Amino acid sequence: MSGITRTTAALFVFLCSCATAFALTPEQCLFFETNGKTAICHAAGSIKEPFIFLEISEQGCVNGHAGHLLDYIAFLGAPSCQIAACLPAGAPCDATLACCDGSACTGVSCVTTPSPTVTVQAVTMQPGGVLTFLFPKSVKVAPSLGTDPGDTVVYTGQISGTTDGGDCATGTFPIQGAAIVDLRISGIRISQPVNIVTISPTNPIAPGTRLGNLERQVGCTAGGVPYDRFLGTVE
């Protein structure tokens, strides 16, 4: 492992709530070496000072401390042995020292544990239902959206994140892909992709849902972004 990689890994050894560590491994001595040194907490066997902070050579760590009962990798950000360190993702691990929160020991190294996937049910709207959505002012269309009775918005279903409602509405709302259809310029029908925010209802809208009879409302700001607010009727 390069010195840069080792330095990065060593600096990201975060403090954790581990109260007990048991022994170093040679792999940990090598992984956490920085500029030829590995920082460890050496078990001194003293009641007054049970652990001593040491910065020792890579080989000194491997030959003199790997397997030594209670020795463990130190937290380099604030050299101290008052609390055990935890091992970051990618670090060699075993049962002697815990991986940091968000990762788990596979028997070889700490591996980041994926966050559970949360599925948000898209709302299927019935014809005639009315939705309130926000259209970003930064997106320029000509003529303006809603000017022509043929203007429609079709949801594509792609979610690109969420935004707070700002002064538009209270809550957090999905930012969803849509297509503006039938914007007539000199009689030409066109389609333009855009991300819109639906604030009523608050769930994502089922792909393919088409809104017509668009009616512009008072503008507002959500997530620091200025929007035009529209009502649209499901076709």
Image (spheres, grey):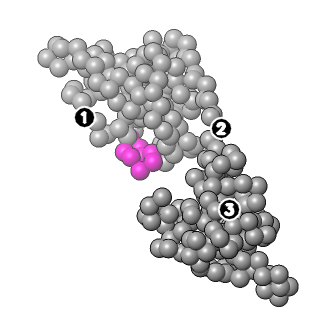
3D distance between C-alphas at marks 1 and 3: 61 Å
- Location of residue 23 (image quadrant): bottom right
Instruction: Relative to 24, say whether 81 is above or below.
Output: below
Q: Residue furthest front?
A: 63
x and y, in percent, of residue 119 in the image:
62, 29
Residue labelled with disc 3: 25
Q: Residue furthest right?
A: 47
Disc 2 secondary structure class: loop
Name the main secondary structure of what is drawn in magenta.
strand
**Quadrant containing the C terminus in the rendered view:** top left
Q: Nearer the viewer, mark 1 or mark 2?
A: 2
Dot 3 amino acid type: Thr
3D distance between C-alphas at marks 1 and 2: 38 Å
Q: Earlier in the sequence, mark 2 or mark 3?
A: 3
Q: Residue furthest left?
A: 186
- Neighbor class of circle 3 (other Cα within 10 Å; few <14, some 14-19, many 20+) is many
Q: Residue at x 42, y 46 (%)?
A: 221
Disc 3 secondary structure class: loop
